[in-house]
Image (tube, rainbow, N blue to C red):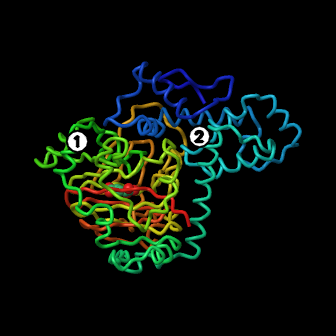
Amino acid sequence: MGRCCCCGEGDGEGAPSGDIFVLLARHMRRAARAGAASAPSQPACPQTRLVRFARSAAGRELLVTCVRRTHALAPWTRPEPLTEPAAAIERACSERSEHNGVLEALLGALLLLRQPSDARLILDNFRQLQPGALQDGPLVKVAARALLADAALTQRAALLADPPATPVSARQAISYTPVTEVEAEHLTVSEFQARFVRPRRPVVIRRGAYAMSASLLSLDTIRELAGESRVQLRRPMADSVNWARLEDAQHTTVSDFLERLATHQAEDLYLFDWSLPVHCPDLAARLQMPKWVDNDYLTQQPAGQRYQAAWPSLFIGPKHVSSAWHVDVFGTHFYMAMMSGEKEWIFLPPAQLPLLYPDYSASAEPIFEVVSMPQAPVSCACTCVFHSSATNLFVMPSFVTCWQADVRRPDEPETPAVQYATPMRCVLRAGDLLFVPGGSPHTVTNLTDTIAVRRLVCLIP
Ligand SMILES: O=C(O)CCC(=O)C(=O)O
């Protein structure tokens, strides 16, 4: 590998060490100073910009260099099961006092190069040589992502060997199982736990939102109690690596956003997951915990404990704006109470997550996509994202191509496993309360302008 034409980095003495995103950021800054990297085509969060860079020729070259240098220097980092005499390898390993950092960089690079199986084998080698060595916080995090990514490959193969459904191609059209609906006054707590929480099934509880508030929150109430508060809005972006592919957008006041919504000038801006206890306790005080979920471990923590008072949070979104496929954090259950408008929800059962091609290269919260990588690194060039909203395809010419996995596009040849999934669907209307079991991948579209409130819950059995 020669020197990179944009920043002069190339073959060097030491193996790269530490967080691969820090290395990418440093490289990107140098490339920008040398005038070799173009500005990103759209504003985006730092992590999304770094992943864009990792997909460019210059970024890919850095990743490949990182992998090659490390393999050359530390035999235990080769992606084959250990065959060399363990003592020699052990020596090489212990001479390298910073081996945790080296392994961290290597695993991060392999994940971004979409080689999770290599990452897992290297991790196995490392654990064989250094049992108990995985105690370093940053290393544990990237190791966990490598294991998740590799497990998803294995689980997808197992699901395809015994698929949950006949492929959509044989069924003509995609079909959705309707989510079960129950009237609030007929649903006892024990029935809720037995039918929905334990088997991890979603349910729409009609009129359930009234268990939170006798009168549903209106824009007027929100304006009155929270109008002056400042909020950071979000907006969808096709190649975002953030949760639900929503990127941070501008800051404004709640009343300014509501005014834009009323005058149809909110565009694709979304007031999303805005913590009411943190930002507007008066509004939070109006909302009660519905009886079905009041055995929540998070709220029973001592005051001041992280997440003890993070939710409920507020969502106000204009018609057509969507949250892309995602899974909620820590695999927790959550519920959403609809205050006004309508939302379409599409889910997969938690066990079918691997059919959506979860990708852990940017974080432990997966995005869902398939990337085609060129075999050989190409020369440095600018990064440029082309995005077609019609097909949801975004392309970086000559570098990599990404396909978002989505059960609504079962014919996409690059993501064939999605056609074996058995999606569920519901439309949530004002007054409804939806329970979503932990670990369920889902995507949500505002069919009208909407107001909703949502809370993550860890239910104590
Ligand atoms: O309502 C939305 O747009 C997304 C809500 C959601 O998916 C969530 O809270 O996890």
Where is mark 2, residue-wise? 108
Q: Secondary structure at mark 1?
A: helix
Q: Residue at x 21, y 41 (%)?
A: 227
Vertical relation: 47 (above or below) 182: above
Disc 2 residue type (three-letter): Gly
Query: Is residue 420 in view from this perspective?
Result: no
Where is mark 1, residue-wise? 254
Disc 1 residue type (three-letter): Val
Cα distance, mark 2 to mark 1? 39 Å
Where's ligand 1: which quadrant?
bottom left
Position of the N terminus, as image quadrant, is: top right
Q: Earlier in the sequence, mark 2 or mark 1?
A: 2
Query: Is residue 358 in view from this perspective?
Result: yes
Image coordinates of residue 210 in percent, x first then y, are: 28, 66
Q: Residue at x 88, y 43 (%)?
A: 85
| Left or right relative to 265: residue 183 | right
